[in-house]
Amino acid sequence: MKLSSLILTEFFFFISSCISISVAQKSSVIPLFNNKDLNNWDTYIGPGLDSTGKHRMEVPAHGINQDPLKVFSVVNVDGKPAIRISGERFGGLSTKEAYSDYVLRFKFKWGKLKWAPKVKAKMDSGILYHAVGPHGVDWGFWMRSQEFQIQEGDCGDYWGLDGASFDIPSSKNIKGEYQYDAQGTFQTFNNDNTIGRHCIKSMNGEFSTGQWNTVELYCHGDTAVHVVNGKTNMVLYRSRHIKNGVETPLTRGRIQIQSEGAEIYYTDITLSPIRVIPMSVLPARSK
């Protein structure tokens, strides 16, 4: 009888432990999009642009949480809620909170509309991470941040905004452009350096325009990993801000989604804290 009671007690302890672990795992996932509205976000609309991309002085910035054109809205797409970014005016949709040490996951697909000055260009957006400081410091539209490029055919590229910098192993491709190469030489990408602030991804993981794509961004300490549809196409090291030779760490900040001249939809946006970047998304280096 005592043995049976002990076994029964241990069984209930095991079940309750499993429930506790399950609840803990679920609670560690932070839904950044609540499927209803943009209450967890701030909007920023910058100045108007002419057909060449220059600021139109007669079309001033709307600023923070002033979006009369509904550049950012919540709609239903393919039977589920999604954030629609019209692209009509350049700007950003930013989380109210700052984050570090996480994996950000989301899905996106392109719409059909394009706006000046990018009517004839690729459809363009982007995920800005470790975003800090005031809005509009980069080209009048975006915060100081690191960019996970979301652009037709270029998803996973890197851009540094307002002096944001990364060291990225890379080599020159046949066009003479720097491209991520896990076995390449580390280069510092920064707007003030001769090589610039843009590094091209290693492979194209994006699906055809009009299909949903799944994106993962791993950030831990000063390292980041860009993953598109399960394919790692860049690992970035030593995130920092460099200006006039002065370096400061850039490892925590808000997440900002760009409006950049193209209609795009985002959904299933979640963030989960991590203690380490999983080896499964880190290509091996021999150098």
Image (cartoon, rainbow, N blue to C red):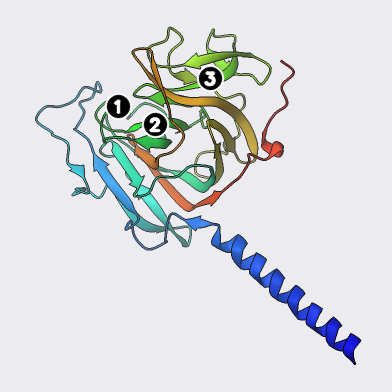
Type of residue at label 3? Asp
Tell me where residue 104 appears, x and y as whole percent: 52, 45
Which element type, helix, strand or loop, lies under badge 3? strand
Q: Is residue 21 left or right of residue 36?
A: right
Residue count near mark 2 (Cα–Cα under 10 Å), binned few <14, some 14–19, many ≥20:
many
Going 37% across and 58% down the picture, which residue do you hit?
75
Name which quarter of the figure residue 59 lies in. top left
Which element type, helix, strand or loop, lies under badge 1? loop
Any mark on residue 138, and which? 1
Q: Which label's residue is closer to the chain start, 1 or 2?
A: 1
| Quarter placement of the C terminus | top right
| Quarter placement of the N terminus | bottom right
Q: Is residue 233 left or right of residue 65?
A: right
Going 27% across and 32% down the picture, which residue do you hit?
141
Q: Which residue is mark 2?
A: 145
Going 43% across and 30% down the picture, which residue do you hit?
250
Total marks drawn? 3
Vertical position of residue 90 compared to residue 19: above or below: above
Q: Which label's residue is closer to the chain start, 3 or 2?
A: 2
Q: Which label's residue is closer to the chain start, 1 or 3?
A: 1
**Would residue 151 be visible to someone looking at this image?**
no
Tell me where residue 84 appears, x and y as whole percent: 37, 50
Tell me where residue 24 appears, x and y as whole percent: 60, 63
Q: Which residue is mark 3?
A: 167
Tell me where residue 20 appears, x and y as whole percent: 64, 69
Q: Is residue 218 left or right of residue 93?
A: right
Which element type, helix, strand or loop, lies under badge 2? strand
- The reply to whether callout 1 and callout 2 are in contact (CB within 8 Å) is yes
